[in-house]
Image: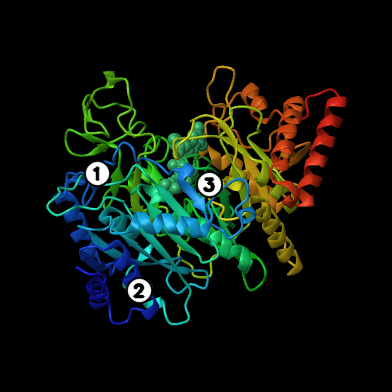
Amino acid sequence: MTATAHSTLATASAPLHADRRVVAWVEEIAALTRPDRVVWCDGSQAELQGLMNRLVADGTAIRLDSRKRPDSYLVRSDPSDVARVESRTFICSDREEDAGPTNNWAEPREMRETLTALMDGVMRGRTMYVVPFSMGPVGSPLARLGVQVTDSPYVVASMRTMTRMGDAALKQIGPGTHWVPAVHSVGAPLSLGQKDVPWPCNETKYICHFPETREIWSFGSAYGGNAILAKKAFALRIASVIARDEGWLAEHMLLLKVTDPQGRVFHVGAAFPSACGKTNFAMLAPTLPDWKVETIGDDIAWIAPGPDGRLRAINPEAGFFGVAPGTGESTNLTAVKTLWGNTVFTNVALTDDRDVWWEGLTDEVPEHLTDWTGEDWTPASGRPAAHPNARFTVAAAQCPTISDDWEDPEGVVLDAIIFGGRRATNVPLVTEARDWEHGVFMGATISSEQTAAAEGTVGQLRRDPFAMLPFCGYHMADYWQHWLDVGAAVRKAGQRPPAVFQVNWFRKGADGKFLWPGFGDNIRVLAWILGRLSGEADGVTSPVGTLPAPGAIDLDGAGVSESQYAELMRVDARSHLTESEDAARYLETFGEKVPHEIHRELNTLRERLRGSLANGGDAA
Ligand code: GTP
Ligand code: SPV
Ligand code: MN
């Protein structure tokens, strides 16, 4: 067929109400990628069923036992395509300095040439799906729109769960509406009669963002954030740029609602790096009596000043793409209950009775499984049955603790912001920032041990500012300035910015074991945090910030010994001074753009640490 015939194909299949610019763009991409068919997705249940049937027929998905796990599927990816690929993720801003030292920059014109060559005819033999979506409740003033085209039915099904996808979103796009175009291909054209593989992908991968034109192009992968472009590519990398220009924040944060025993309601956002416990914290089952935690989001928050100047937040997503390993009955029963059905599992193990299993789901390990690569597995195999970055995809609405305000179009007022990471040493269980500026410094310099959620060396310590290192669409130091500006705007409106805290659930003792029980017991820390807001919880000043006063954290029944607690809270001035030297070197890599407030906070920290050393050493 000729490109013209394909254009006709794209137009003929378009819904009548589709915006002309969207249709024209789809035509253009179809002419380049030359799919056999173009399908405009309506987001219906019947459409999803059709996609899943097709994935089963193609051998991509396995239908799980319908009594054990109704309408649920297991998908095994290609072993070369199991996580986000940060080394192949590019910010193609006009000027290199706008991408900053933490991003891979590529010259936009050159990248367009590369992508055009790669995408030329790339969808031959495949169907191109047109996937209109809304990030945020349809019609919310905080919502933003996008359209992804993709040749992966698995990605379409994922987008159906993760976003408000289909006709309702498409109808939001009118002549003057802004929408983000996103092109995705697995990069595996099929020649006539060629048999497909269960998980088509390409060794070459590109995940590209054009911040000026606000568009996304992704080639070669079908896994997670590489392919579900509404998520990290749009809702963080492109949205962070839009947010900078419009005066709001797009963040790698969970959102939760807490009700204390007096019935007071608070909303909290928390930024932890990938696979560091956002889903767990968002679904926290409190071990303290009469506390209630409800879930709003587990990965991304969009935060904007409301009419009164206070910061309000929405979860732009509609589903959870959560880490399976470590999610179990004892660690996150709420998540386990959420996954009762209507769930797509990727790279977990298959039980002999056609259900799923992964490390940590149950204490008892099954005697026989089919592992995530399709091989026989027994406990003696000496390798994990599920991939460490195996994931579940499920609708947020199915979560038993989903909050009644999770789809509030105006968002929820944010009372506190928490930063966290995985730190085996040094970082106390919880620290309160003195003010917004100190909080921004905490966020800017936070570090974490790397997890399997992306390629790289697991366990290696890296600075991960605001848990946004792989997700900030512009210069990181400009982003810090933007955070300072947002706080200043809140104050200018006569309001107080949210209080800021840093937590660390992952400190280890000399025996190499976690000192803190974590999970449901994290409510004890949250209770102290909220007590600080109401002025009811006591704190003590330390060089790194305010720590809980002795006895201010309820440890009743936590099984934490006095010496363990002391170790959890210990601030070793000497090692913090060493860390602050590293922080200084880190800030240098951002050059002139580092806001003076950040330097000021670093100097204050170092002075306080030196003062504490002069007074004998142990700072806390
Ligand atoms: P992304 O979806 O990649 O952004 O990650 P996430 O932050 O949502 O990760 P998730 O909540 O799925 O956490 C993954 C891992 O953290 C699992 O292995 C959990 O067992 C572990 N984890 C979560 N909370 C705690 C905690 O309080 N203590 C300890 N020790 N581990 C935790
Ligand atoms: C993360 O890595 O932070 C995730 C998973 O939430 S992905 O969508 O693949 O980015
Ligand atoms: Mn994430």
- Give the Cα separation between the discs numbered 1 and 3: 28 Å
Mark 2 crowdedness (10 Å alpha carbons): few <14, some 14-19, many ≥20: some
Q: Residue at x 82, y 41 (%)?
A: 604
Mark 1 crowdedness (10 Å alpha carbons): few <14, some 14-19, many ≥20: many
- Give the Cα separation between the discs numbered 3 and 2: 31 Å
Q: Which residue is mark 3?
A: 470
Q: Residue at x 67, y 69 (%)?
A: 309
Which amino acid type is marked by label 3?
Pro
- In the picture, the disc for residue 168 is 2
Figure label count: 3
Who comes first in sequence, dot 1 or dot 2? 1
**Whether the residue under disc 3 has CB within 8 Å of ligand 2:** yes
Who comes first in sequence, dot 1 or dot 3? 1
Question: Vertically, is 414 above or below 589?
Answer: below
**Whether the residue under disc 2 has CB within 8 Å of ligand 2:** no
- Mark 1 or 3, which is nearer the eye? 3
Which amino acid type is marked by label 1?
Leu
Which amino acid type is marked by label 2?
Ala
Location of residue 187 in the rendering, given as x and y in whole percent from the top left corner? 31, 51
Mark 3 crowdedness (10 Å alpha carbons): few <14, some 14-19, many ≥20: many
Location of residue 18 in the rendering, given as x and y in whole percent from the top left corner? 33, 78
Q: Which residue is mark 1?
A: 74
For the residue labelled by badge 2, is the local secondary structure a helix, a strand or a loop? helix
- In the picture, the disc for residue 148 is none
For the residue labelled by badge 3, is the local secondary structure a helix, a strand or a loop? loop
